[in-house]
């Protein structure tokens, strides 16, 4: 809500940054990310790494659900495919990790075409159900092809060495994840500003109108599916490296719900929202355990025995409360706060 | 031959459970346009409450039945009032996500309130084995099939003849006009949730008696999706038939192909049906007007 910034051309309108203050803030944020390993211990750093990986996945889902308006409950399937593509290609076939990461994007993107084509005629509820069904089918296929995937016992994954640089410690792996997350942010920002991004948003807002204006719904929906699954697959591969172990159990159905919760909490359709939501939802169980530890031993015991359930409970509550009270998510809160800040003491 | 008959019988029994839950999906969808992803979880909670009742009254089947039906109705009405009704005018993603949020909460609550271990229901009357020709089935399994047929007849008669049933059909076909004609659509929605909760709750309890009570019971809800998609999301009786088809298919696949494939057979059916007839076998074809 800064005043005095007039945009006279489309080029100015789609600029990534439009003011010095914005560039300064971005520089400060990047410096903070670069210096974080000096200030955080092992635990804090692994939490930030997890937030970065989650943010990558959330941005991937955002392309599909946030921009194109296609609800998917099956993005875990593509995480699983990405993680397994990376694990099999690097550990079993001895591919270089960079090629493995590329494969972790390409395989889910191709698989998403298979899921996407039957989904072209479907919207809303039906699409949610189809994608959920495909998630279960993929998990089953992974278990069935145990010659390739090692079945339910899973595959060990080592930390990668990319272009001669070994990401073997937690600090170095942190930089890898942050780097991938920044690349994803840049890719998503650029995609959103392009012809394709505008077409996707047009499809979300009114698919018939978009079609009349010459947007081929079928190919653009497939683009959305492929892009989303590519990004989600990469996040799956990183998550596999983070866990240093890839199994089907590492990617439960709760993850798909977590991903949608992130979008809702952050503010659907916005990249910054996806990142904020990822930080919020990954941090939420930690904050809760801190509160529980203040409550005493009994509460802490409950937390340690049923961590998974309490996580589920929190996700559910967060989803419902945000939808009820703040449907535009944290980004909506931020916009409101900005408006109040600039306009105070006036209301509008 | 007797292997096939056994597979068919157990398929019919489990298919009746899917059919009942699929009917609840369809009832709620038809009268409110909402798909309740938490239906399986609500059935599971009803089964757990029934278990709590049964341990305190030594497995008297009548008290358990009355208590669990009463609980199912009260619970569903509370959920509808607190969580669902304020969301009715929101976009479809918000509505779906609220029911998904509820489902995650219920799943966690079951483990936190009761525990994560499998239990027997402790109702000897339902546990008893009956031999019919070649097949040995439990009373509860026969009960669930009979209940399904009773529910089909009751639903058909209700929507065909009763004043309230006609009102529900009116709300389903055009909400606004029905309200102008004096139908209270809030009441219709409450009735739909109550009826759905009874059907799925009874299905959950009977399934728990026939098999076992465990926190993975919510998967019945997931398995009922194929049934309701097969029958048509807005076809109540079609969904019941879909349930039987899915149950039998699953058991035949499990018996003759592989047990792993049995788990996903229903989901394969979903994708096939949505590719060929997205509105289901008995559903109304939706024609969109620009």
Image (cartoon, coloured by chain):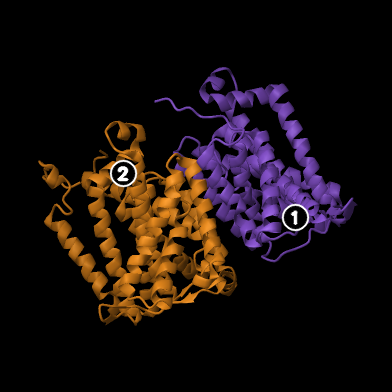
Chain colours: A orange, B purple
Pick whichever, A345 or B99, lies toward us: B99
Residues at badges 1 and 2 in contact (C-beta under 8 Å)?
no
Q: Is residue A156 left or right of residue B221?
A: left
Pick whichever, A309 or A80, lies toward us: A80
Q: How many marks?
A: 2
Single out the mark in the foreground, 1 or 2.
2
The chain holding disc 1 is B
Label number found at residue B208: 1
Question: Quick one: quadrant of the C terminus of chain B?
Answer: top left
Residue at the disc numbered 2: A200
Q: Quadrant of residue A307?
A: bottom right
What is the x, y in percent for residue A248? 52, 67
Q: Is residue A190 left or right of residue B201?
A: left
The chain holding disc 2 is A
- Is any part of residue A277 visible from this angle? no
Give the residue drawn at x 52%, y 41%: B274
What crowding class fits label 2: few (fewer than 14 Cα within 10 Å), some (14-19), or many (20 or more)?
A: many
Mark 1–mark 2 Cα distance, whole angstroms, equals 46 Å
Pick whichever, B248 or B15, lies toward us: B248
Q: Quadrant of residue B195?
A: top right
What is the x, y in percent for residue B55? 81, 59
What is the x, y in percent for residue A59? 34, 56
> Judging from the image, what secondary structure is the residue with disc 2 in?
helix
What is the x, y in percent for residue B57? 85, 55
User: In the orientation shown, which residue stands out farthest toward the front?
Assistant: B1
């Amino acid at each position: 809500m800064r005043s005095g910034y007039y945009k006279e051309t489309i080029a100015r309108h789609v600029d990534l940054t439009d003011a010095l203050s914005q560039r300064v803030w971005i520089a400060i944020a990047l410096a903070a990310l670069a210096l974080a390993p000096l200030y955080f211990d092992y635990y804090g750093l692994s939490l930030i790494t997890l937030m970065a990986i989650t943010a990558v996945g959330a941005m991937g889902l955002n392309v599909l659900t946030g921009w194109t308006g296609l609800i998917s409950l099956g993005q875990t399937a593509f995480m699983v495919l990405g993680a397994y593509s990376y694990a099999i290609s690097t550990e079993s076939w001895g591919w270089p990790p960079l090629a493995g990461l590329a494969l972790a994007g390409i395989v889910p993107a191709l698989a998403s075409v298979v899921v996407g084509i039957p989904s072209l005629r479907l919207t809303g509820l039906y699409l949610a159900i189809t994608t959920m069904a495909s998630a279960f089918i993929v998990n089953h296929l992974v278990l069935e092809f145990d010659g390739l995937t090692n079945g339910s016992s899973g595959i060990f994954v080592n930390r990668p060495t990319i272009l001669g640089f070994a990401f073997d410690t937690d600090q170095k792996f942190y930089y890898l994840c942050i780097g991938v997350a920044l690349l994803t942010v840049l890719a998503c920002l650029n995609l959103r500003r392009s012809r394709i991004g505008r077409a996707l948003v047009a499809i979300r807002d009114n698919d018939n109108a978009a079609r009349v204006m010459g947007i081929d719904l079928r190919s653009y929906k497939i683009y959305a599916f492929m892009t989303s699954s590519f990004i989600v697959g990469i996040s799956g591969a990183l998550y596999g490296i983070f866990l240093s172990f890839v199994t089907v159990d590492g990617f439960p159905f709760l993850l798909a719900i977590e991903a949608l919760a992130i979008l809702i909490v952050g503010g659907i359709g916005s990249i910054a929202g996806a990142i904020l939501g990822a930080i919020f939802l990954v941090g939420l169980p930690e904050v809760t355990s801190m509160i529980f530890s203040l409550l005493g031993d009994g509460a802490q015991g409950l937390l340690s025995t049923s961590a998974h359930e309490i996580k589920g409970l929190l996700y559910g509550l967060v989803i419902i409360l945000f939808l009820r009270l703040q449907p535009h998510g944290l980004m909506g809160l931020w916009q409101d706060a900005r408006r109040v800040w600039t306009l105070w003491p006036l209301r509008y | 031959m007797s292997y096939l008959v056994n597979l068919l019988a157990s398929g019919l029994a489990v298919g009746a459970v899917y059919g009942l839950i699929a009917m609840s999906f369809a009832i709620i969808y038809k009268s409110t346009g909402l798909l309740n992803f938490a239906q399986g979880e609500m059935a599971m909670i009803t089964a757990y409450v029934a278990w709590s009742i049964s341990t305190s009254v030594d497995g008297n089947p009548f008290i358990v039945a009355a208590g669990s039906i009463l609980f199912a109705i009260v619970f569903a009405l509370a959920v509808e009032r607190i969580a669902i009704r304020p969301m009715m005018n929101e976009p479809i993603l918000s509505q779906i996500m609220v029911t998904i949020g509820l489902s995650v909460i219920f799943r966690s609550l079951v483990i936190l309130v009761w525990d994560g271990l499998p239990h027997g229901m402790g109702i000897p009357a339902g546990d008893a084995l009956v031999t019919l020709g070649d097949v040995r089935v439990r009373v509860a399994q026969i009960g669930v099939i009979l209940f399904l047929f009773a529910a089909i007849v009751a639903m058909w008669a209700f929507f065909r003849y009763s004043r309230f049933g006609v009102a529900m059909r009116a709300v389903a076909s055009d909400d606004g006009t029905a309200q102008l004609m004096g139908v209270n659509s809030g009441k219709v929605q409450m009735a739909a949730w109550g009826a759905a909760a009874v059907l799925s709750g009874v299905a959950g309890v009977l399934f728990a008696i026939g098999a076992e009570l465990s926190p993975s019971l919510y998967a019945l809800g997931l398995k009922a999706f194929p049934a309701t998609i097969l029958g048509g999301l807005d076809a109540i009786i079609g969904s019941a038939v879909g349930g039987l088809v899915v149950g039998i298919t699953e058991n035949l696949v499990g018996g003759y192909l592989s047990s792993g494939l049995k788990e996903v057979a229903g989901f394969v059916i979903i994708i096939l049906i949505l590719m060929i007839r997205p509105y289901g076998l008995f559903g109304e074809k939706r024609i969109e007007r620009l």
